[in-house]
Amino acid sequence: MRVNISGRRRFRRRLSAVALGLIMLTANAWAQSWVPTEISRLTGEDESVSVSSGQSLYDLARARGYALEHLAEANGLPVSLAVVERETVLVPSRRILPREAPANGLVVNLPERGFYVFRSDKETGFFPIAIGEPGRFQTPTGSFSIVEKVVDPQWIAPEWAGLGEDNVIPAGPDNPLGDRWIGLTSSGLGMHSTNNPSSIGSATSHGCMRMYPEIARMVFDRVEVGWPVRIEYETSRVSLEKDGIYAVCFPDPYGMVDRKAQLQDKFQELDLDGFYSLIDVEPLLARKSGVCTKLVDLEVRATVDGKSYPAARVGGKVYLEGSALEKLGVRQDFKLADKVVRLSLGEKSVVRTLRFDSSASPSMGEVFLSRGGAWYPAKEVLQSLSLGYEWNGSSKELAIGKPD
């Protein structure tokens, strides 16, 4: 099954086009400061670890609380229990936290093959899981809550197990639930330990979410009955941070979504459509590595008379936010119905195209809007207005001179 989200996107664009056709804005309307969120959604740091003789990816992953698949995808290696023929491997420990996280609760992301425990009095934790196999047994998405916690649970074998009627497997090494069970508000759905820990990271369960035994015991002690559990299906996440725009992509284990469209939606949710159009997302989508990547550098600053203004660098090209131009005395007249902006400085006047469609590659010199600010390609706009500038790569500073 594939979920069609393109209709929702088209509707949103039509609605935006209607609004834009009715409004004409001047520079003052876009003079609000362009400030990323104050609360970071990044957690952890990627780690390069040495491989000892005879170690497998599974050994390395389990020792650090990750799944074999996490390390295989991050390092471009096959999912295998064989000995690793490398000196070092990358552990993708830097994650982008889910949006709208609960104060106390769990968020499971099936493509990520993992879940987050949020607890107000403790640090957030990420833990790997095995999820349901595609088709009949795939793990459902939705909002649930914890209804029970059981130590050393019995397993009442369902019909699909083929063990006959009234077949109860007692606690012990033969019990596939392991020694911890966390039941959710859906019959038969839960999170549990396992007697098959090498399956963690795969899509091979019958719908439940398996954990390493040591992690199951840890999580069991952290969570409470009544806590919410949100199971979602995000093949990508995007975060706007003070130093840049980050993104991460995961596989699509159930073949449910258009991964590129979902990534674009994540940019749209943060009003970053214009930046999406500047980025070559194909390598990111192709890797599906789970490695968090900075796509836009926001540590770049434009300076006028020593004062800093927002700027960004994408693929080696620098973009200015309109407040720097205003400081230079440049007037910005937006005619959204015509999708243009006129820049005026003294007797000079240039017209630039305003870009609203982020689905195609941008043309040279186009301007885009993001989070209440207009963004301009620095070189093209400054040269067209005969404004001098100097780029310092080591300090990431674009010093712009006022006109004589």
Image: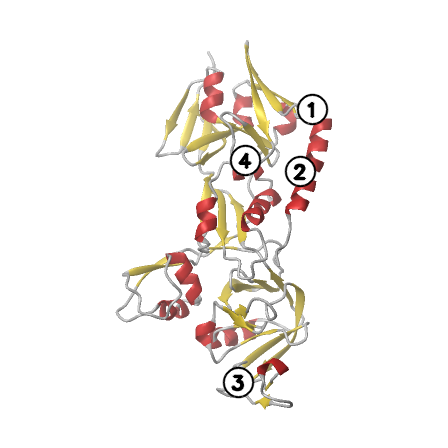
Per the model, the C-alpha gap separating discs 2 and 3 is 52 Å
The residues tagged by marks 4 and 3 sit, at their Cα atoms, a distance apart of 53 Å
Between tags 2 and 3, which lies in front? 2
Tell me the kind of residue under disc 4. Answer: Ala
Q: Residue at x 65, y 27 (%)?
A: 29
Which residue in the protein does label 4 denote?
A: 360
Q: Which numbered disc, 1 or 2, marks the residue closer to the eye?
A: 2
Categorize mark 2 by other alpha carbons within 10 Å: few (<14), some (14-19), many (20+): some
Element marked by disc 4: loop
Tell me which amino acid carries mark 3: Asn
User: Is residue 326 placed above or below 158 in the rendered structure?
Assistant: above
Disc number lying in front (1 or 3): 3
Nearer-N-terminus badge (4/3) = 3
Q: Position of residue 208 (x, y in %)?
A: 58, 73
Question: Which residue shows up at 59% across the image and 65% down it?
Answer: 106
Amino acid type, label 2: Arg
Mark pair 1, 3: CA separation: 67 Å
The answer to whether marks 1 and 2 mark residues whose Cβ atoms lie closer than 8 Å is no
Image x and y of residue 122, in percent? 54, 64
Residue marked by disc 2:
13
Residue on which the image places disc 1:
24
Disc with the residue nearer the chain's start (1 vs 3): 1
Q: Amino acid at mark 1?
A: Met
Kindly identify which residue carries mark 3: 175
Q: Who comes first in sequence, dot 4 or dot 1?
A: 1
Query: Would you say residue 305 is visible in this rendering?
Result: no
- Residue 191 appears in which quarter of the rendering? bottom right
Q: Secondary structure at mark 2?
A: helix
